[in-house]
Amino acid sequence: MASTSRSCAGPVSSSSSSVKNGGDSGGDDAVPESDASDTPTSSFSLEQLKRKMEQESVEFEFLKPICGLVLQNPSEQHLSTFEDAIKTVGKVPVHLSEYVTFPFAIHLKIIRKYKESERIKIFKALSKLLKASDLRSSFEMFKNVFEKLHVALLLKPDSMEVNKQISEEELECVVTCIHSLTASSLGYHMDTICEPDNVKVFGFSIYILLQLLGPDMLKRIRLKTLEILENEVNLCEGKPKSSQVLFNFLPGIISALRKICLPSAGQSVKSIILKSLHLMGATINVCLEFKSSGDLDKADGVLSQIVELLSADFVLNEDADYRKSYFDFCRQLATDKDKLPKCSKAITSILLRMKEDDESAIAGASNEVLDDLGAVEEIKFEDLSNLLMSAGDRLKSGNDTACILSLKEAASILSSRKLSFLEFQTFLPLVFQFVNEMVWKFRNTITVNNSRISDPVFVATCRVCCNLASATDLDEIMYEFTNVLSEMQNNPHSISYTTGVIVTFNNVLSIVTKSKSSLSEFEAANIAEIYLTLVDKQSTEITLQTLASDIPAVQSAAEMRRMYLLEGLGILGSAYPNSVIPIVLYPLIEHAGSQNSEAVNEAAELALKNISSPIPLDEFLNKNLDFIISEVSVRMLNLILYPNCPNALVFLADYFDFSNEAFSGFIDQVFERCSDVFGGGNVEHIYVKIYYALIRSISRHFKMQETQNNLDVNTKPTKSLQDRLLDYQKSVGINLPSDNPNSLDEVQEDNADDEGLDGCPQENDDQNNLEVALDPVRLLVLKISHRVLNFLPNNERSIRLTTMDCLILGVELLKTHENSVLPLAHTIWQNLVPRFDEKDYVVVRKSFELLQSLCKSCGTFLKKRTIDEAFPRLSSLLLMLAKEGEQVKNKNRQYYTYTQAYKLQLCVLQGMGDLLAAIDVQEFELDKIVSGCILYLKPNQHKNLRDAATKLLESVAKGKHCRTVWMKLIANGLREAPAIPPHPSFTPVPQAYFSLHSS
């Protein structure tokens, strides 16, 4: 080390002398000789290097005094001068790099002695120097700076833990220095640093840098650290010795990068994740470049596990960038399968899954890699069967991600190879069984061909079913499915997985129907007939519309089968309209209007839209109106045999106005069949639903027409401001001067003529208010309303509910004609009041809705009867329900909202305000209503009920009723009167009142 001391002493003294000669700063801050004794050496002796630089370099004379200043005192002024000098020089010559870097190498040794602000300035100046130079000429100088920069990041010089307390600015400056140093100089010393004596420095660097990748670091620091690691890995490529050194650090690198590669961390760290994944693939490739298969047994197993773990996060990710990056990672590892047999098998499975990717670029590239590897040809049928059975096991265990991955792989295999007849016969029952289990688990899912968003497991399953059509001869498929469907038709219970058969066949049909040559018109019609037979077998007895429940619907097996059968009819009808639509159109309309299941209704309507595409459904129905009316009319002749006929009318009510002349003959037929006298039997529910369909159609289209008329009125041109002012002046009796001089005489003559008419009898004012006669549409509504009154006392709950639905719509349409609606309301009342005494809260709730409609339409006509007959019944019922609601525990509050008792209370509280305003209740009549609302203000009542009661009291307290509400609240629990009463007409309540009340 003597030579080192001698070589380092020269620059220090020469720098010091140059500073003294400069005279712009003191020379007292000389570096101790002990510090200079351990500085790096050069390949030249110092004197030789100095003479060479003096002779060959002008930059030396320029930089020498500045370097001396920095060496003696790294002040802000000196460092700024140094940065300006480096900027002036541009690229520092190679023979000057060691000399210029020397002052910073000295300061890095004692960097902890400086304050944070001083350290940051030193690192910033060093960063600019390292970007403008390289240390190719001196490995010792490079090693010294490289190592000391990493030590600057540590908590203690002798520890291996990064200092987490270091400021972000200082940390970023150090990382920038390391980045600049490795980018400019590491390539020249890569072989040397991988020598046994120096390899610890390389490993030390990797260990420290991996700690900087933690999630608690700044994003830009993590990205720059990844760039440093990537540069170090790339420099090892193609070098056996460096590759072997890097292989020793592979487990630590993979472990650290695996923790970062989590797409679930969010979009904010997307660039970090993608860069980490790329670095992981590059590191593995470099490490395994010169390894033989015998040395990689352990690494093979670990890498296969890493690849599988990453696939769950990347293959199914919605972001295509993640999937593309993971494909590139897999392509990097798609090496010789003899070298990494386990990893190659895992890579093949992943590429098969990515072959089914939604992005065509990823799917096509995966297919190309698979072809290059020849992996698909080696896949056996047993592998395909095992994949499907594995998907079933994972479905049962709730591991949906693994299930989807297995299904994607199975779908890819089916699209790549053909199945023999025996393989198809063996594989088909496995598909049926899995699909049946999957459908039963995801009961609220519609298949992939419909517009509703499907569950990912369902979508992957449907891909398997669709690819099954391309893996086998279509004739064999149709033959097998036709036999299975025929067996289901003859004996529905002979096959345990009927739903799986239907869903599978629907997806196969979606592929088969694209090639019409594989299925004739006759065969398509035959399949449609079988489907319709199966639909009829799955149909349950007709039920009428009830109030919608908020409880999440759980579909039965029969409902699911009907859904998928209806979907299959839509697929067949869209592909073979000439032969299939005449068979399936009316049944689909009938099921779309059924009130049994919302899911079945949606499935039928989706099938109709599929058939009508690209024509809108309303145009399609109007185009086939004659056929539809013919089908309905035939069934109307014998409603006993066709009890579901009203369902078709309910669906058509949303698309056609039954009061039009086109339906006049049909309406006459309805009234002819539905006689006035009902002697019981089982047809009343059919008649009431027909009436409901008629009045629903009229109400819907009458409202649409009124809305259009209002729009037309609003779009009419209005008078100018001047004309409106003139009209106002005339209305208040102001005589306006006229430009015509004769106008005053004319006005006087007109007044004289009017004086003679004072004694003449005037037209009765009531004659001007004569009600206009009912139009034919309202006459039809009135006729229907009187007819359905016969059903209101019926014993069947569904009939009573549908009857009240009809009356609500009818009363709303007739509200502008008092001579018609008031007698109707009088007739309804005697049958409505007993409904409030029923124990069925659904009927009571619907009765209250009818009461609301009557009061809004009739005004004060029903006021006395409502207060005397309806309110007492509702009050006693709500009192009982309020006491029951107080006893519901907090943990059961959510379930309580599903009960009909809760829904009844909420309906009454929310609708009572409009009802009271309609019948103009006076102040003295509000006592019971306010008392009932106060019951729901208690804290142990449900929050929604408290809010509804509060809003009701606020609405009642507006205007003239505020006194009653205010005093009633004070009397029932308001112990502290506010300083300002709720209405200006009140004075504050005396405190003595509260004392008397409390005593």
Image (cartoon, rainbow, N blue to C red):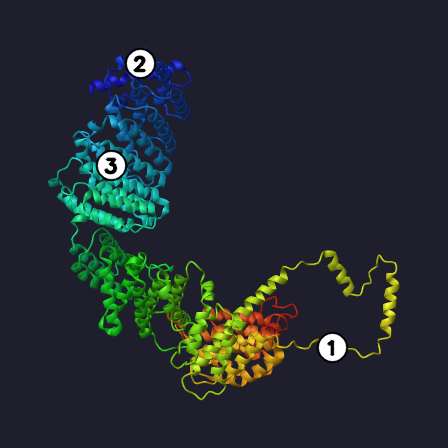
Q: Which of the 4 image quadrants contains residue 765?
A: bottom right
Compare marks 2 and 3 and give the one earlier in the sequence.
2
In this view, 909 is above or below 276: below
Closer to viewer: mark 1 or mark 3: 1
Q: Nearer the viewer, residue 655 or 809?
A: 655
Q: Residue at x 32, y 39 (%)?
A: 222
Q: Is residue 596 left or right of residue 825?
A: left
Labels 1 and 3: the sequence-earlier one: 3
CA gap, disc 1 and disc 3: 102 Å
**What residue would you read off at disc 3?**
206
Q: Which quadrant of the view contains residue 591?
A: bottom left
563 or 171, nearer to the observer: 563
Image-based side of 639 in relation to 711, left or right:
left
Q: Which residue is mark 1?
A: 765
Q: Amino acid at mark 1?
A: Asp
Q: Which residue is mark 2?
A: 53
Q: Secondary structure at mark 1?
A: helix
Q: Residue at x 25, y 46 (%)?
A: 367
Quadrant containing the C terminus is: bottom right
Q: Which amino acid type is marked by label 3?
A: Ile
